[in-house]
Amino acid sequence: MNLRSLGEFGLIDRIAGRVAAGTGIIRGIGDDAAAVEPSPGTVQLLTSDMLLEGVHFDLTFTSPEALGRKSLAVNLSDMAAMGGRSRHFLLSLAIPPSVSLEFLDPFIGGLLDMASCHAVSLVGGDTCASRSGLVISITLVGEQLPERVVYRQGARPGDLVCVTGFLGDSALGLAELRAGLRETPAISRHLEPSPRCNEGLMLAEAGLPTAMIDVSDGLLADLGHILECSGVGAKVFLDRLPLSEYFSAEAGRLVSEPIQLALAGGEDYELLFSLPRQYLPQARQLLSARGTGCAVIGEVTEEAGLHVTAPDGSSYQPAGLGFSHF
Ligand code: ADP
Ligand code: MG
């Protein structure tokens, strides 16, 4: 079977036939719009991310399964950063002639596997042909009680700046791919990030963070967003950045200034949040119950601006803030 003989509607049917039953779905794939029912008393959270061949992924590096998983993971990560519970999503695909059904089947498999891991259901989308590369666009709908949603604004002077997991592995993985390596722990983190869904939800439902964001563009850039939205500044200490054992051992072989990968590398999909100091033990306990680390990397200040301090106490000037498309 090939895509041409299957046709657009055949492909949609093929996708629809693999979708597991979900909750809150009045009408899923197969009408002009999906109809879903939010839980009573919640606000809906909507987020969308596009992944473009040649911009966000390289088909020579990634397997179709991994790409499917990552396409949904980046959206789940945004929802986690709002403290939301992800529920339903739309999948839009622009498919170039070079992409076959042999690619799409495992791609959908990876995507739906990630969906079932996080209890989200595919309820619709759009499908068309592309004349350039593969384009994947996902819109995710989630929900949360209005008073539990965590925004980028809300960080207050004296709050701790915290981050889950490790920083820099994804950027190291990308550098390794470009250098010709194919299977390392950092490459796995780059190609198959794990969104911190439960972590974001638990922190939000416990009412702990004052502001939160996921680290997609790079620590400094993303922290910059929190600071700007909150009208505050922060100091960050280089020797407190959480680095994996693999990163500490290997990054120096490939790049001249490894710490730069942790500061500005991006795509770590960890949660970065500000936390009133007295909540630290509770936050650590919640996260460690899930096997997730929580590093305190600095402190929110009244004075605007982001100050990075080197291990010797001197002021560190980062080479770049992070990723920007333009
Ligand atoms: P319309 O012409 O009204 O836009 P479509 O023919 O595009 O309808 O889609 C038919 C149905 O299939 C709709 O329910 C739509 O949400 C769903 N659909 C289309 N493409 C996808 C896809 N890639 N994944 C999941 N559902 C899809
Ligand atoms: Mg359509």
Image: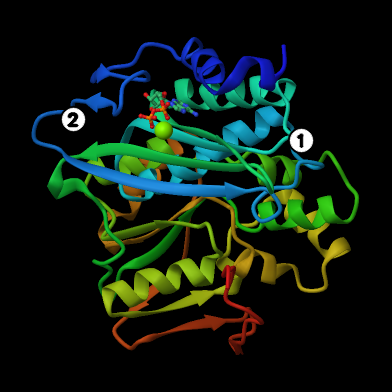
Image-quadrant location for residue 232: bottom left
Residue 170, position in %: x, y? 67, 52
Residue under the image location 74 percent in, 38 percent down:
62
Q: Nearer the viewer, residue 146 or 300?
A: 146
Question: Can residue 122 be spotted in the picture?
Answer: no
Image-quadrant location for residue 172: bottom right
Q: Quadrant of the C terminus?
A: bottom right
- In-image side of 220 versus 81 (left or right): right
Q: Nearer the viewer, residue 183 or 252?
A: 183
User: What's under tag 1, amino acid-wise?
Assistant: Ser
Residue under the image location 54 percent in, 74 percent down:
237
Question: Can residue 229 be spotted in the picture?
Answer: yes
In terms of secondary structure, where does tag 1 sit? loop
Q: Nearer the viewer, residue 54 or 43?
A: 54
How many numbered callouts?
2
- Tag 2 residue: 38
Residue 301, position in %: x, y? 33, 81
- In-image side of 118 versus 178 (left or right): left
Q: CA distance from mark 1 to mark 2?
A: 39 Å
Residue under the image location 66 percent in, 25 percent down:
104
- In-image side of 59 versus 324 (left or right): right
- Tag 1 residue: 98
Q: Nearer the viewer, residue 10 or 178?
A: 10
Image-quadrant location for residue 21: top left
Residue 219, position in %: x, y? 53, 66
Q: Is residue 65 above or below residue 251?
A: above
- Which image quarter has ligand 1? top left
Circle 1: is it few (<14), some (14-19), or many (20+) Cα within 10 Å? few
